[in-house]
């Protein structure tokens, strides 16, 4: 391979790695601030557009902003209507890369500064004992590598231009071929910024004419949609809707740019000539990239509501007993804060399902004074249906808990700050408590099978104790609700008080009544023992359910959760 090609591809590699380091370092250094900026983008279209554009320009990664947006939609912190404007703004923000390449990389000689930047950044990365300093070091080193890569690519193209040139294709078919070249480059490199940088440096060196380079830039914008489509395969419905909005906007923008390309580029060159700039291919292309993305925003503005309405009716979730995760989206894994938010939302949903499972244990043994066999011919079908429902619900809960464990295993915990780490620790407690609830429900179901084989005897005090216990049990579980979030009324303090002041006395009363019935001979001892075991298993499961809710609330209220009061160790 010739030296020119080595410089070209080596520069491309440095550019790609520099972009990755810059984006990763800025994301980690920003920490929760990136999330808070986007989370506030819920007021108006303009705020969403501005937030997406500014955040993307700062972190130099539309992928990071897209992932963050998906995470917020999954966690119900952003509506789809707000999220689409953040995405449209992110497309505008990506044009900042073109301006950086145009003015910093090609107009200013950064060759002398790039290596010192890499050295200083590497020193901060290696010597930094604090998480944020290390992240800034990574960003600084990435910044230097990015510009050194541009320098190498520029040198490679300059040497090649004297002996080799991309064939110039005229007419619509020629522009279409160059557009497809931009698509292919972006798909292969997984970076529209790299494709745009290549187009700019190639145009600056005369390897390709400015119209052809503009067509490559259009293709780079289309190529990013392929990444979004691939990322949405197997993702949550919210992620698919966000990806579909991203694809719709980019395709509309690219189509509009392709139509006006023969007139827009000459128009920009004419304006630059009028103000005395002269021939400036990189500046022309940077302006073209910004203008056609802004044109896309103007075109889609009146149709956004219809787009959102159409997307909300598509990609429906699988609602078969809540068996599939609804918030654990793998696209959030690289960003720890968003991944933790997704985990919290999923565990809140699992909490509700676990409460439903416990609610199905409410039918205790039939009071003796009703003179009804627990499994008479009339009741057996209903009892069998309930057992089937309980077994199916427990299977779903197990599947969701396993999915949450796998999600945590894949999480980028190396880039996690201390506050996010503490929130994750709290959520791992929640998961363990919920797993205990599921195991408790399984134990209760096994005891129910044994109780079905025994006949109760009359004992009025025991029947009264069972009634009070049932009411206390229902008070802890609370009203039946629909949705995926823990209701705001169910704060830790209220559940703890109900547990201590209502449920625990009722349990102790039932326990005493069972022992008294067994001692008096009015209740068979084997049945008494099983009934005691069942009530004890219910008590433990309810305590675990309350603990899970306490830690869920703590994880959602603060970045650094403190241990809630726990009177039932």
Image (spheres, helix red, strand yellow):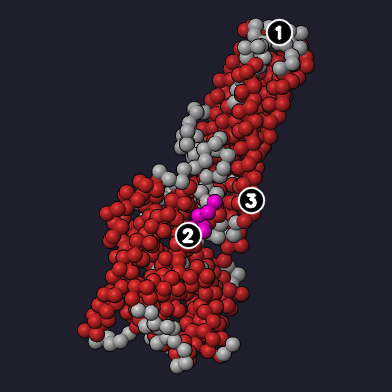
Residue 6 in picture, x, y percent from top left? 56, 86
Q: Which residues are magenta?
A: 229-234
Q: Neighbour class for label 3 at 10 Å: few (<14), some, many (≥20)?
A: few
Question: What residue sits right under mark 2 in the picture?
Answer: 228
Of tags 1 and 3, the one toward the viewer is 3
Query: Picture quarter containing residue 385?
Result: top right
Label 3 sits on a secondary structure element that is helix
Instruction: State which tag comes first along the sequence, 1 or 3.
Output: 3
Residue 212 part of the magenta-drawn span: no
Question: What residue sits right under mark 1 in the picture?
Answer: 457
Query: What is the C-alpha distance between the residues marked 2 and 3?
Result: 23 Å
Residue drawn at x 47%, y 59% as measured from the top left: 228
Instruction: State which tag comes first along the sequence, 2 or 1.
Output: 2
Query: What is the C-alpha distance between the residues marked 2 and 1?
Result: 66 Å
Q: Neighbour class for label 1 at 10 Å: few (<14), some, many (≥20)?
A: some
Query: Picture quarter containing residue 409?
Result: bottom right
The reply to whether the C-beta atoms of the residues labelled 2 and 1 are less than 8 Å apart is no
Residue drawn at x 30%, y 87% as measured from the top left: 279
Q: Quadrant of the C terminus?
A: top right
């Amino acid at each position: 391979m010739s030296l020119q090609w080595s410089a070209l591809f080596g520069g491309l590699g440095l550019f790609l790695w520099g972009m990755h380091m810059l984006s990763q370092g800025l994301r980690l250094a920003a920490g929760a601030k990136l999330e808070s900026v986007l989370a506030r983008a819920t007021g108006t279209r303009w705020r969403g557009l501005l937030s997406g554009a500014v955040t993307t320009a700062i972190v130099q990664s539309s992928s990071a902003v897209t992932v963050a947006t998906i995470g917020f939609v999954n966690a119900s912190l952003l509506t789809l209507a707000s999220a689409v404007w953040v995405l449209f703004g992110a497309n505008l923000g990506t044009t900042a890369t073109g301006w950086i390449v145009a003015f910093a990389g090609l107009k200013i000689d950064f060759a002398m500064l790039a290596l010192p930047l890499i050295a200083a950044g590497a020193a901060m990365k290696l010597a930094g004992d604090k998480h944020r300093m290390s992240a800034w070091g990574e960003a600084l080193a990435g910044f230097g590598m990015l510009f050194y890569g541009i320098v190498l690519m520029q040198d490679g193209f300059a040497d090649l231009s004297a002996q080799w040139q991309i064939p110039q294709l005229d007419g619509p078919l020629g522009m279409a071929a160059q557009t497809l070249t931009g698509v292919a480059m972006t798909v292969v490199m997984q970076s529209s910024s790299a494709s745009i940088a290549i187009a700019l440096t190639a145009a600056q060196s005369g390897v390709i004419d400015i119209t052809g380079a503009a067509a490559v830039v259009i293709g780079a914008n289309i190529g990013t949609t392929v990444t979004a489509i691939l990322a949405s395969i197997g993702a949550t419905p919210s992620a698919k809707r966000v990806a579909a909005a991203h694809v719709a906007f980019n395709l509309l923008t690219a189509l509009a740019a392709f139509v006006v390309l023969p007139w827009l580029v000459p128009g920009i060159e004419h304006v630059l000539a009028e103000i005395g700039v002269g021939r400036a291919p990189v500046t022309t292309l940077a302006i073209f990239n910004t203008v056609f993305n802004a044109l896309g925003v103007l075109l889609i503005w009146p149709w956004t509501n219809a787009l959102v309405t159409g997307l909300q009716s598509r990609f429906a979730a699988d609602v078969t007993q809540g068996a599939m995760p609804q918030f654990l989206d793998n696209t959030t894994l690289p960003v720890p804060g968003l991944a933790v938010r997704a985990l919290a939302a999923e565990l809140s949903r699992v909490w509700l399902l676990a409460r439903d499972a416990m609610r199905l244990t409410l039918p205790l043994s039939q009071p003796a004074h009703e003179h009804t066999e627990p499994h008479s011919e009339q009741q057996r079908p209903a009892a069998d249906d309930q057992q089937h429902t309980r077994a199916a619900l427990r299977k779903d809960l197990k599947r969701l808990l396993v999915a949450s464990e796998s999600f945590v295993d894949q999480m980028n915990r190396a880039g996690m700050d201390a506050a996010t780490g503490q929130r994750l620790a709290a959520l791992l407690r929640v998961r363990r408590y919920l797993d205990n609830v599921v195991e408790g429900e399984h134990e209760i179901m096994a005891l129910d099978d044994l109780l079905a084989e025994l006949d109760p005897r009359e004992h009025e005090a025991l029947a009264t104790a069972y009634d009070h216990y049932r009411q206390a049990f229902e008070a802890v579980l609370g009203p039946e609700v629909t949705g995926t979030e823990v209701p705001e009324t169910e704060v830790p303090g209220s559940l703890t008080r109900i547990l201590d002041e209502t449920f625990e006395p009722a349990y102790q009363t039932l326990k005493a009544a069972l022992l008294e019935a067994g001692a008096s001979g009015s209740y068979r001892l084997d049945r008494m023992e099983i009934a005691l075991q069942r009530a004890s298993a219910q008590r433990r499961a309810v305590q675990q359910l309350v603990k899970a809710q306490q830690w869920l609330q703590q994880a959602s209220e603060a970045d650094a959760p403190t241990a809630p009061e726990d009177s039932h160790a």
